[in-house]
Amino acid sequence: MEDLARVLKHVDIKVATDSHIYLKDPDICKDCAEKPCTLFCPTGVFYWDKHLNITYEHCIECGACPFGCPFNNIIWTYPPGGYGVEYHS
């Protein structure tokens, strides 16, 4: 949690009402043994609790999630206009 706070202190996120991150088929995740999506996201957007959960509200729009899924099961797009991340120092 400390790492998440460190990353998020440099961004303001205006959260849209609908997620911009989707799974093509949630059942595919059940057969994924290593669950790499829960490891490579710098803000922990993906976590496993009986099924894969997506906390899109924490997304910093790095765009890595589709590339980290060995099954090509993650769809990521930018949030709709006016929503998403504003970076600052």
Image (cartoon, grey):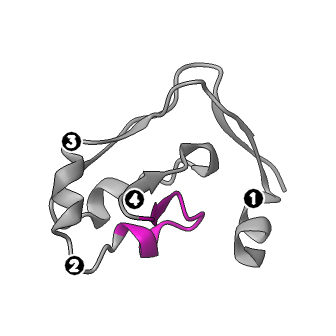
Q: CA distance from mark 4 to mark 2?
A: 20 Å
Say whether disc 4 or disc 2 marks the residue closer to the N-terminus. Answer: 2
Task: Check disc 3: other Cα within 10 Å, few if <14, some if 14-19, many if 20+.
Answer: few
Verify CB contact (< 8 Å) between mark 3 and mark 1: no
Question: In the image, which residues are magenta?
Answer: 37-49
Image-based side of 69 in relation to 42, left or right: left
Residue 54 place in picture, x, y as percent: 47, 50
Residue 56 x/y as whole percent:
54, 44
Q: Mark 3 — residue?
A: 24
Question: Can you tell which mark lies on residue 8?
Answer: 1
> Do residues under tags 1 and 4 come within 8 Å of each other at their CB atoms?
no
Residue at horizontal 30%, vertical 54%?
A: 66
Residue 67 to residue 23: above or below: below
Few, some or many residues within 10 Å of mark 1 (<14, 14–19, 20+): some
User: Does the magenta run of residues contain 32?
Assistant: no
Mark 4 Cα-neighbour bin, 10 Å: few <14, some 14–19, many ≥20: few
**What residue is disc 4 on?**
64
Q: Amino acid at mark 3?
A: Lys
Which structural element holds mark 4? Answer: loop
